[in-house]
Image (cartoon, rainbow, N blue to C red):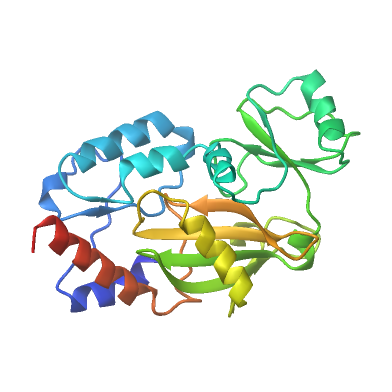
Amino acid sequence: MMRALRPEFGERGMQIVDVCWDDPNVQWTDFAAAMIGTTWDYWDRQKEFLKTLERVEQSIPLYNASALVRWNSHKSYLRDLESKGARLIPTLWINLVTDDNYSESFSLLDSDDLVFKRQVGAGAAGQFRLSPSDAKPDMPHPMMVQPFLPMIQEEGELSFIFVDGEFSHALIKRAKTGDYRIQSSYGGQEEKITPSISDLEAARQIMQTLDSTPLYARVDMIRDTDGALLLMELELIEPYLYPEQGPQLGGRLAKAVASRLKASAGL
């Protein structure tokens, strides 16, 4: 994704330098700001990652802000959004999956087809789609449990990209035949779409629940049986923002970062 950003940032006199978040030799004060990207190991090192972000933010602006990242790093943020009116898939929250609550999940959700996801995780890592006849797999992490929605295979997952609170572009992600995971690492494919007014408004309403405007955000949604959209995820940490489907992304981000840096400098 950085290849899509560099030309636009360069035109505005900014340079993107890739650094590892856990590199102890990085001098953060050498940079004007830090933008999180592809930190796809944070869910197994959550505490270390969040402490690093707080340390970075003491020196330079961080996008997105560490407090927002901390909140978004645990899927319980979905419960906060639900309390503000977001429509979610029915969900059970289980801190320790036992034989008893594993079996009980199917009756509580009235479904013989459940998806178990890590409460801290991403990219379908440690995720299971299970039926009552399946033996309980090893799930050492706190999990969230949801009924499987066939629409993920019939239509796919819709993603809406926002930059500085403004809509950038949208796409639909579809799983390969025989799978339900829409990530490209599992064979999923993406296609740019022009969302309907009602679908875009549903995504905007999710963004409006936030107390502050993130530099970047991805709203992932799935269609319910009544045609309305349900929130799957609000990705604010290290989401892939699909520049292939949104060639204007680099310019939008560069403009937003330049504006924020001027504001932080009091210009």
Q: Quadrant of residue 69?
A: top left
Q: Residue at x 25, y 72 (%)?
A: 255
Q: Residue at x 70, y 47 (%)?
A: 89
Q: Residue at x 49, y 52 (%)?
A: 235
Name the one closer to the observer, 132 or 201: 201
The correct choice, above or below, for 264 with respect to 196 in the image is above
Quadrant holding the C terminus:
bottom left
Q: Residue furthest right?
A: 133
Name the one closer to the observer, 248 or 21: 248
Describe residue 150's horizontal placement relative to residue 3 as left or right.
Answer: right
Describe residue 164's horizontal placement relative to residue 222 as left or right.
Answer: left
Q: Quadrant of residue 128?
A: top right
The correct choice, above or below, for 102 with respect to 86 in the image is above
Describe residue 238's horizontal placement relative to residue 22 as left or right.
Answer: right
Quadrant holding the N terminus:
bottom left
Q: How far from the left and from the top, in percent, is residue 33?
A: 20, 54
Question: How many dots with numbers?
Answer: 0
Q: How far from the left and from the top, in percent, is residue 232?
A: 62, 52
Is residue 191 in sight in this rendering? Answer: no
Q: Residue at x 79, y 62 (%)?
A: 226
Q: How far from the left and from the top, in percent, is residue 2?
A: 34, 66
Q: How far from the left and from the top, in percent, is residue 180?
A: 74, 56
Q: Quadrant of residue 181?
A: bottom right
Is residue 136 in sight in this rendering? Answer: yes
The correct choice, above or below, for 157 with respect to 245 in the image is above
Describe residue 228's horizontal placement relative to residue 13 as left or right.
Answer: right
